Image (cartoon, rainbow, N blue to C red):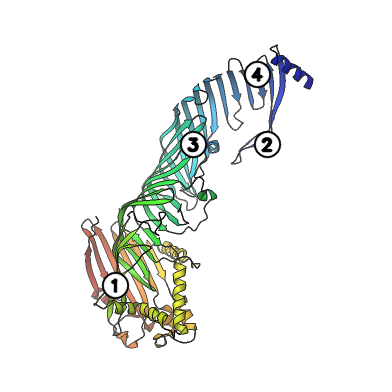
Amino acid sequence: SGQAFSDSLIQALTGQDYSIDFKMSFTDFTLSDSYSLADSQVDMHLENGLLSFSGSLVDGIFDTASGYLELDIDENNLFGFKAKGYIKEEMDLLVTDLRFPLPLMNQFMDVPTFSFTDGLIEGDVLITGPLSNPSLYGMAYCQSYEMTLFYLPDQTITVKNVALSINDHSLLVSRTPLAGYSEADGRYFFGDVSVDIILQGLGVETFDVSININDATPVDFWLPVILDGGGEVEIRGDVSGYIDFAVNAGKPKLTTDITASSMLIDFRLDEELPSWCYDKTQGPPAMDITLTTGHDVEFYYPEKDSPFINFTLAENRTARFIFEDGVIRTDGAMALKTGQVYYFRNDFIIKEGSVDLSERNLFGTESTLPVVLNLRAEITDYDSDGNKVIISMMLQNATLDNITPRFSSTPAKSENEILSMLGQSVLASGALDRTLSLSSLARFAATARETLTRVGVLESNKNYSITGIVRSSLGLDIFSARSNILANVIVDALPGEITGRADVSMLARYLDRTSLFAGKYIGNDWFVKVRLMLKADSNVRLSKNVGHFLAKDLILDTEISLDWDTPMGTLSVFTQPQELSVFDILDTIGFSVTRQIQY
């Protein structure tokens, strides 16, 4: 009763013998991740400094004078153990029959990029030392645990037969084999993992998970980066090698030394990121990424749906990316295997080139990716007499925010003649002409729409998703298709006319400058490429000099090449037939040897 409790309390305060009985109830006790404590009641009895307690989930005694404790927490609780020893300023406590669910560790680590999803630790631990910062000694075991990483989406890592060594403030899981499964594509992967946890006081000071993925079973790796100023970078592909995720003093860091294949690098995120990625108080995780290229590592700028430039990197090249405080620093150089540069509605095919990752800022701010380009790209066109002209575009020390090309041709022509063939002069003269026609304005607007689409001002047609499906269905390593049908239809539908358009058929007008590019690895060292391009022929008398497709005024330009990577360089066998016949293919065959020196 209330009177008996108050009398006992007065006796305790006055130093007399006393005895107090009371109850404690726990209801609606929940943690995040759906963990909850069953409703329970504990009967407590305090007599002359000795506290005893018992209930459905906990039993024990505690001597307030000596600090002696005996405690038994039922395993049906959130966690269970037995403890016996002393708890005062200096601890000396033996914990036995420990059963601790690993997902509870997530409650003590504010690390949304990593979590345990299953697992139970069992073992014995001796706790000694100051109450504020005790030391732990013992061994624990886990039959199996599962964990996930934000950077390995839709993939679960499983580790079995784990031994946990506990020494002072360190909890160490030595390197143990792992297996994993991807819910997205059903792939399995294998490797090994180690875990190192450093305790400080009653919290976790350092948490480090180190993973090695076997080369034969890569994982799907996703690295989204939010830059200061709103910029975005996305890296996604299959990787193998070393992946380390650590949290030190509350600051996360991702470190890798990986080999990548089937990887895409671009500057727009398609998927919505969780809110913590935009948390300015904590900031994004620091990163130190060492990446070695394998097959099919592609780069798109400004984004994959409508790039100005895209290229595939050569194999066995290494680069390093360091991201700290919203700033990216890079190191290394990579050779280009192939790719495309889109310039005034023309797709130039990259023949050779390199990417130099130097300390330069992409957009003129400290928050962007430094990329310096040196390359040579080609396109085939025809002069007014029907002669084939190979137009070369050169970029020298160009950056993604300042692409200023130079042009040459075979046979040699002036730059004005080359630009006229490419169609640039039509826009330039029309834009400056005071008597600008509606058709010329439509051409300018259609080209402007494509430009706005490519820089993300207008919504793109998501053509990368379509080409990705085609590439996967045909088993290709590289595939891209581009069409200017929309721009051609807009121009054709408006009154007035542009010089030369009335001289070609409707089919030729609509399919003008449609291009297709495909590539496939054959083994480790061989690579075959096919390029097709359609171009409207405004002069029918050219038909005897060039190959045509579907109509006499629609030129089909074809190039097929086979590259062989050798220690001495790349040997290429190519052909540019006017028609897809055996005789024409053999009649236009050629050879080249390329060796790139980087310094």
Indicate the amino acid at tag 2.
Asp
Q: Residues within 10 Å of mark 1 (few under 14, many from 20)?
A: some
Give coordinates of residue 194: x percent, y percent: 42, 37
Image depth: mark 2 or mark 1 in front? 1
Q: Residues within 10 Å of mark 4 (few under 14, many from 20)?
A: some
Q: Which mark is residue 51?
A: 4
State the SS at label 3: strand
Q: Is residue 373 above or below residue 428?
A: above
Image depth: mark 1 or mark 3 in front? 1
Tell me which label, 1 or 4, sits earlier in the chain: 4
Check disc 3 and report the residue beneath it.
Answer: 144
Residue for point 26% across, 76% down? 583
Is 597 on the left-hand or right-hand side of 475?
left
Indicate the amino acid at tag 1.
Phe
Question: Can residue 327 be seen at all in this image of the molecule?
Answer: yes
Tell me which label, 2 or 1, sits earlier in the chain: 2
Tell me which label, 3 or 4, sits earlier in the chain: 4
